[in-house]
Amino acid sequence: MRISLRVVVVLTACSTGTLVSAQVPSQRTAIKLGMPGSEVRRILGVPKTYMDGRAHPPAYVSRQTVGGIPPSRVYEDIYELQTPVNTYELNVEYESDDSESRLHPVPRVIRILLDLDRRMDVNDMNKLLEDLPEAAAFCGVECTVAIGIRADTLYLHPKNLTPIELAEAERIGSLFGMFPGKGKKPTMWLALERAGGSIIKVVLIDDESSLEGPVRASWKPQRAY
């Protein structure tokens, strides 16, 4: 309950306007949902480590152990990114898109997870978002901000989505036709630590919105990526 009240107070204070930070965004090129794995590698280089999704539970795999692994639905790319604001472990998950070639499917990004090294207070949400090119590229002009019904997550969605963008979200969210579409849309989660409401993770994914509560505010990036 303490988290719920705190988040409500913070967002309600901003509900008459938008959250805009004075922080200058990072110059790094954003990683985006649907981006080909080859483009991710061009931007970020060879990952620091990988995550083997076949292991139970999933396990880290050292680059020194396996060498360079091409982007794959089997291995998730793990990078470490440092900014003046925080250090992030960036986890990029892929799925194969065979819409253009069944023999040579393209690995495309289906989930982006940024694990924060240092917890950030929910009051610093806009400072965190401005530090991440992924957030600005995701939101475009503006994102709505809603509280999860369990009060442990904030949900952000681009405020205005075209039919083409919604169709692409359905395509990515269905893992490129592997599962039927179920009203999925571009979603950014800010995961909150229950004891105190600090932000500990940022996740970008095309997903349903069944656990969302009411919209409390909006956030406008300083510039688009």
Image: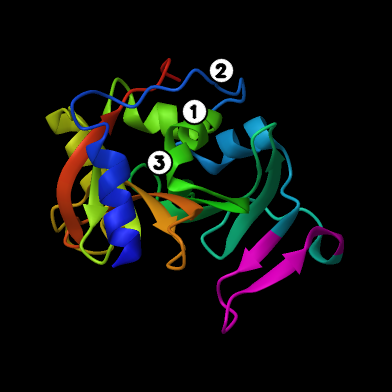
Residue stretch in magenta: 50-64
Which residue corresponds to mark 3? 34
| Residue 18 visible in this rendered orientation of the protein | yes
| Contact (Cβ within 8 Å) of mark 1 with mark 3 | no
Q: Secondary structure at mark 2?
A: loop
| Contact (Cβ within 8 Å) of mark 2 with mark 1 | yes
From the viewer's perspective, is 26 left or right of 45?
A: left
Q: Residue at x 70, y 47 (%)?
A: 80
Residue type (three-letter) at the residue carrying disc 3: Gly
From the viewer's perspective, is 17 left or right of 125?
A: left
From the viewer's perspective, is 40 left or right of 46?
A: left
Q: Residue at x 35, y 61 (%)?
A: 3
Most foreground residue, 42 or 150: 150
In primary-sequence order, the first of circles 2 and 1 is 2
Which residue corresponds to mark 2? 24
> Marks 1 and 3: which is nearer the front?
1
Which residue corresponds to mark 1? 130
Image quarter for residue 194?
A: bottom left
Compute the Cα span from label 1 to label 3: 22 Å
| Residue 31 visible in this rendered orientation of the protein | no
